[in-house]
Structures are given as C-alpha cells and as structure tokens.
Amino acid sequence: MHQNKAKILKGTIVEALKQGADALFILLGGIMVLAMHAGFAFLELGTVRKKSQVNALVKILVDFSVSTVVYFVVGYSVAYGTTFFVGAEQLAAKNGYDLVKFFFLLTFAAAIPAIISGGIAERAKFWPQLIATAVIVGFVYPFFEGIAWNQHFGVQAWIKAATGDEFHDFAGSVVVHAMGGWIALPAVLLLGARYNRYRKDGVVSAHPPSSIPFLALGSWILIVGWFGFNVMSAQTLDKMSGLVAVNSLMAMVGGTLAALVLGKNDPGFVHNGPLAGLVAVCAGSDLMHPFGALVAGAVAGALFVVMFTLTQNKWKIDDVLGVWPLHGICGAWGGIAAGIFGSTALGGLGGVNLTAQVMGTALGVAWALVGGALIYGVLKLTMGLKLSPEEEYDGADLSIHKINATPDREVSW
C-alpha cells in the first residue's frame, strides 16, 4: 500500500515537473519570437527614408498590441476552438501551459501585420492599417492556421487521402510567412507606389535605405529570435529537436551566401538573404538533412535577390522591404522544399510528399490573396489607404506622429 502511494506521489511529481518544463520551454520560445518584432521594427526603420523612421517603430508596437487583444478574444478560438472566457483558476491549470501556448502562437499571428507593414511603408494611413490588422489576425490568418495545424474542415484528411500524406508545415513557411507575403501583395498594389518613385518618363527614382546599421541590427535580431520560432515550434520539451536548430542555421547561411553572390555584395541583400533562408526552412526544418536545408536556403536567397530586383525595377511594384519576395515567394518555396528535401531519397526523414506540399501551399497562397484583396479593397473604397502627396512629402513621422526621429534642433534653456 505504501509502495502504491509512493508510486502515485512520484508520478505526480514527475508530471508536475514535465508540465512546468513544457510551460517554461514554450514561454521562452514566445519571448524569443516577441523579440523578433524588434527585428521587424529595426529592419523597417533602417530601410525606409529618414522621415518615416518613427512611423516604422510605432506601427510594429501598436500592430502587436492590437493583434494581442484580437487574437486573445477571437483569433485563437477560430484556430483552436479554445476560449479564455473562463475563470483564472482554470486558466492557471498545468502551470498555465495553455496561456503560454497562446502567447507563443500569438507572436506568430502578430508577425503577419509586421510583415505587411514593411511592404506598405512610408505612404500608408495609420488607422486603416490597424483595422486591417484586426481583421487579418482575428479571422483571415487563424482560419488557415486552423486548417493547417488543427485539422479544421477535414482539409488535411482530404490531402492525405489524395496524396498519401498531410500537408506539412512545421514552423510556418506557408502558414505564417507566405500568408503575410501574399496578403501584402494586394495591399501594396492597391496602395500604389510612393509619389515620384516611378516617373512618367520611365525613370525609376531610388530611395536608398536611411540606415544600414539599423537594417543590419533588425536582421540580426530576427536571425537570433528565429531559433525560438523554429525550435520551440515543437511546443513541448520532449519533442525538441536539435535537427531543427542545425537546419535553421544551415538555411540561414545558405541564404546569406547566395544573396551575397547574386546581390553583388549589396548590404541590403546580404542582410535579407539569411531571412529568406530562414523563411524557407521553417516548413521542413524537422525533416530535412542539413545539406538539404543549406540548398533550400541558398535557393531562397537567390529567389529574393532576383524577385526583389524584378518587382522594384521592371514590374514597378513599390514593395518597400520586398516582403512579397522575401516572405511570399520564399515562404511558398519553403512549403514546396519540405516535400523535396524532406524525402528519404534526399536524406530527409520522410512522411511528406511533393504533391501534398504543393496542394497545401497553393491553398494558403490563394486564401491570402483573396483575404488581402477583400480587406484592403474595402478599406480603399471606404477610408482610403494612402497619405496625400503633401503628407508623404513631409514624411509619415511628421504627418502622423508630429515628430521626427532626430529633431533638427534641441530646445535650450
């Protein structure tokens, strides 16, 4: 009898320790991805013109705040059927694991408006974008999140019946990054280019980055936080995989080196190359061999350079930070790459196939395009999306926030 009690007590202690370890594990992941939002802010701050730096900083923080409230009240329930309209005692159960899981997944959801922010930078009105953030994080994103990660509507079962495997996206190449990039594309097109960016005589007016050091700082913050984004997507400590960490590393350096070569040592390309590689490896980081991750990342870095150059110069799409090439194109490539380099034939762990990956990726891209076109189309018709020529000339900082990043003079007493 005493032995049974001892076994029960030991089991209870072990379970409590596991719950606490899992809660701490995913909490640390949430904190690391939260830090990535500082990376989004400084990447945008360094890329835009000096007169739009304050706006970049404010947008990312306020978008995150709106995302938190909307995802807590609506979005998380849409994706996972979980409601927080219960007592605090129930919420605190199991060391509050359900709450910190929400926190972790919130940081993913809030990445969508942070991605879009870079595409529409310098000329977008402030309040319409906040409304778009609320709709995207409250419904558009979690709707597909629930399909990919929570078996909603039987879509995964249908893909598995048709192809033999479910659509696999371990850490969000498609669910997060492609979703953000492809929502951003119609937003950028509907908003239009910055005034005088593309002149009627065919001249393309360049707007060089305001601060390469801040751009690089943003990139580095994102790189470091990404290891929480990918590794902690296991969500429990016992499922953590060192393979995910090393694959993330290899994809990051592959993207960097490809962007260095194709971008002809341009610092903007060099610091976005690792992000392209990391975007691409998210989906299959738990399946690929490190050499496969290196190749997938290198392809993504090359894709970013080529597509950014085409969109900006030939197609005249004023996507300021290149979020459609970086997140949209490279995210879609990541979904497909998981089906290629995750296969056992190329050294991967298997359990995935190219047809399933193409189907799931195409579905995510289509949903993002429709959602982005509807949301920003309605906002353009009702509230308008773009600052006036005078407001943009003065800069988003003065027009919206009434202050510059570095005032021209100091008040002396």
Image (spheres, rainbow, N blue to C red):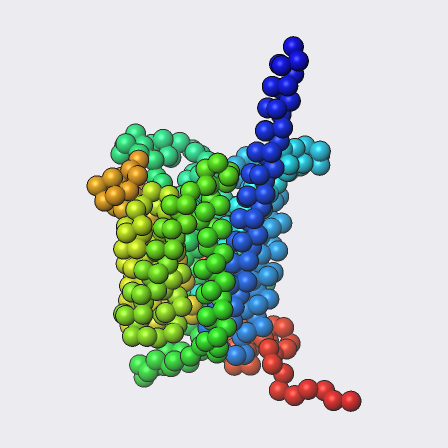
> In the image shown, does 31 or 246 lie closer to the viewer?
246
| Image location (x, y in percent) of residue 89 | 71, 33
Q: Quadrant of residue 345?
A: top left
Q: Quadrant of residue 402?
A: bottom right
In the displayed image of the protein, which residue is found farthest to the front? 3
The quarter of the rendered structure image containing the C terminus is bottom right
| Image location (x, y in percent) of residue 305 | 31, 67
> In the image shown, does 402 or 49 lie closer to the viewer?
49
Tell me: 399 left or right of 362. Answer: right
* Residue 33 visible to the viewer: yes
In the displayed image of the protein, which residue is found farthest to the right? 413
Q: Residue at x 38, y 80 (%)?
A: 206
From what the image shows, is residue 181 above or below residue 192? above
> In the image shown, does 143 or 49 lie closer to the viewer?
49
Q: Residue at x 38, y 45 (%)?
A: 243
Q: Residue at x 74, y 89 (%)?
A: 412
